[in-house]
Image (cartoon, rainbow, N blue to C red):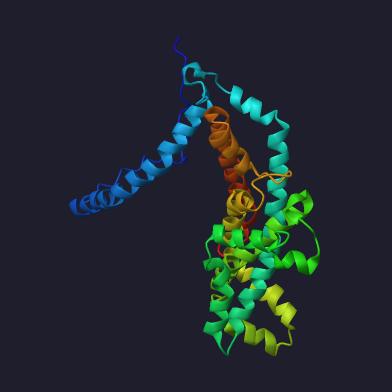
Amino acid sequence: MTVQTTKPTARGEAAEPKRARKVELSEGAKAERRLGWLLCGPAVLVMLAVTAYPIAYAIYLSLERYDLRFPNDSKFIGLDNYGAVLSSSYWWASLVRTLIITIVSVSIELVLGMLLALLMHRTLVGRGTVRTAILIPYGIVTVVAAFSWQYAWTPGTGYLVRWFGLGAPLTHQIQAIAIIILAEVWKTTPFMALLLMAGLALVPEDLQNAARVDGATGWQRFTKITLPLVKPAILVALLFRTLDAFRIFDNIFVLTKGNNDTQSVSMLGYDNLFTALNLGIGSAISILIFICVAIIALIFIKLFGAAAPGTEG
């Protein structure tokens, strides 16, 4: 007896749809596709050379016991370097300090940047002069700006030390971190304002005028009209600045060199790579920083990406 293994099609039941045939591209379309690959090829090769290879090599070094002081003792040890970093109190203390600097500085920059963006956007008289004056700090090289802040807070020479009478603030943890945050805010708030001003330029004036005619106050127009339409620009500004602030290195290196418990995760990686010459541990710290940056970017996109206009659901 033969057992039937397929169910017969019922009368009136729609037959299984045929698989869609692949559309054959014309010769012109194939030529355009080949041209597109050829034009993108150099850029792809450059990206692979300057990003993919260093990242891959850093991952390889992070799996090795590689100390330049003892090159003959190099050995593959797997994830032991990551275990050593994640079990160290230095990593977690540096991570907490980095998060504090990032959250506080970016929050202040967002508020001040929005105020400056509104000022630059609404200024009618001397608009070019106002924008130029506001953007001057962002045009200064970060290291040069950090040295100016160090000079201002150095006892005996600094004018800010004389004004506030703080003694030697860069030798105390809380005061030094506050100065680092202040230097970050002063330097990068114009960048935040520039990105937000680009978003404000996309807000239709007709909506503002209609709301004004309907009796909406300035705060209501800002919260109900301006902010929802500027959310994509806010996302870009926050994402860029958060990733940049999390990798802070130059301000700390110039102001305190990581002393007095002001070390960030980037400073910790630098000390292991270039001071201790431990490429294994230093590379593991670099990969962990890369993972943290990727997680931050994913969180921002998940939280704010769906809130942008035109991305319902």
- In this rendering, the count of numbered labels is 0
x 55%, y 21%: residue = 78
To which quarter of the image does residue 209 belong?
Answer: bottom right
| Residue drawn 57% across the image and 39% down it | 270
Image quarter hosting the C terminus:
bottom right
Q: In this view, does 215 lie above or below 138?
A: below
Q: Which of 272 and 41 is in front in this view?
A: 272
Q: Where is residue 235 in the image (x, y as percent from the top left)?
A: 60, 60
Farthest-out residue, left = 27
| Front-lying residue, 281 or 50 | 281
**Rendered position, 189 above or below 133:** above
Task: Return the residue found at the far right.
Answer: 165
The location of residue 210, given as percent across then percent down, is: 64, 86
Q: Residue furthest front?
A: 156
Indicate the quadrant where residue 193 lies: bottom right
Q: Where is residue 304 in the image (x, y as percent from the top left)?
A: 63, 57
**65 over 181 or under it: above or below:** above
Which residue is at the front of the view, 19 or 199?
199
